[in-house]
Amino acid sequence: MRPCACARAQRGASVQRLLTHAPNAPPQRREPFLASFLYSTVLAHGSLQACVASFLAEKLSCPVLPATQLFQSFTAAYAADASLVAACHADLQAVVDRDPACRNYIQCILFFKGFQALQAHRLAHHLWTRDRKPLALGLQSRVSERMQVDIHPGAVIGPGLMLDHATGVVIGETAVVGTNCSFLHKVTLGGTGVTAGDRHPKIGDGVLIGAGVSVLGPVRVGNGVKIGAGSVLLQDVPDRCTAVGVPARVIARPSEAPDAAGSSGDAEPAILMDQMVSDDDSSHWAYII
């Protein structure tokens, strides 16, 4: 089993170490047009968290939220909570490991809005849990406007999450997401009804959720689950199962294909990013999608 992004990320990441993973030549030499942008965003800072704080402060700033004040708030959050830094490292490593379109760390920091939106959420969640809810909601609103990703600051998200493409991702207030998960674009973890309280999904570790999936209500999705693209999930899913359809149903369980890599027997679908359903799995369908 491959070491998780969270474990490997604990080594930390200096700016120079990030640059050593950019192949062939330093990024500013390969594209001189972006040299000043790279310097102000990355090279002028001594750590990954400082880069992220600076970048997000500029990207999310507006007349109501000045960049200088946002940068101070973000920097203070990272200094006060080491878990924020560890999660940022793990999220970055997850993208580099799982997305073949990502060539290096710098590319992810500068251009992958899924990573950027997730770090903004983590900072907003830090503020939310310290009773600075108006500012946390303001950040949520700005991320939604600028990046088309809407994650309530009350949602709890474990380290090592990859939001691939990320456009249209919606995660509600009482949702919980485990460690080392992967979500494609237009994933919704939503509630049902108008009653307050626990009303959003609980997602286990290592879960892969395909594009356009809606998971509604306080359902529980077990560890190592794969949910096929376009599905609408309204019921619990046990560990290491594959669920597809509208409404989604379990079509394969570990005992049915214990050794099939990338199928229901695979304990790490979020790491492998295999979104296909095997012939063995599809033979268990009891209805037509």
Image: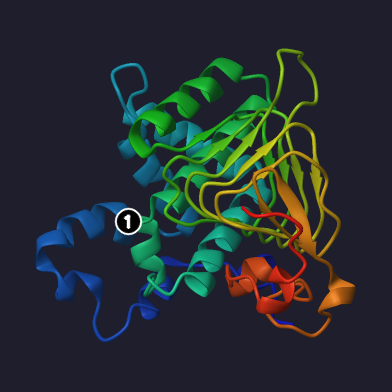
In depth, the one of 45 and 270 nearer the eye is 270
Image location (x, y in percent) of residue 233? 70, 43
Density class for disc 1 (Cα within 10 Å; few <14, some 14-19, many ≥20) is few
User: Given the current orientation, which residue lies at the most extreme left position?
Assistant: 33
In depth, the one of 90 and 260 nearer the eye is 260
Residue 260, quarter of picture: bottom right
Report the residue at 76% width, 26% height from top. Answer: 199
When the figure is inspected, residue 77 is found, relative to residue 31, above or below; the finding is above
When the figure is inspected, residue 30 is found, relative to residue 49, above or below; the finding is below
Mark 1 falls on what kind of element? helix
Q: Disc 1 residue type?
A: Phe
Image location (x, y in percent) of residue 164? 47, 57
Report the residue at 28% width, 18% height from top. Answer: 63
Q: Which quarter of the rendered picture does the N terminus lie within?
A: bottom right
Q: Can residue 5 be seen in this snapshot?
A: no
Q: Is residue 37 left or right of residue 147?
A: left
User: Given the current orientation, which residue lies at the most extreme right position?
Assistant: 255
Q: Is residue 193 left or right of residue 183?
A: right
Q: Is residue 137 left or right of residue 36?
A: right
Report the residue at 36% width, 74% height from top. Answer: 19
In depth, the one of 45 and 100 nearer the eye is 100
Image location (x, y in percent) of residue 137? 53, 21
**Residue on which the image places disc 1:** 111
Residue 136, quarter of picture: top right
Q: Is residue 77 left or right of residue 57?
A: right
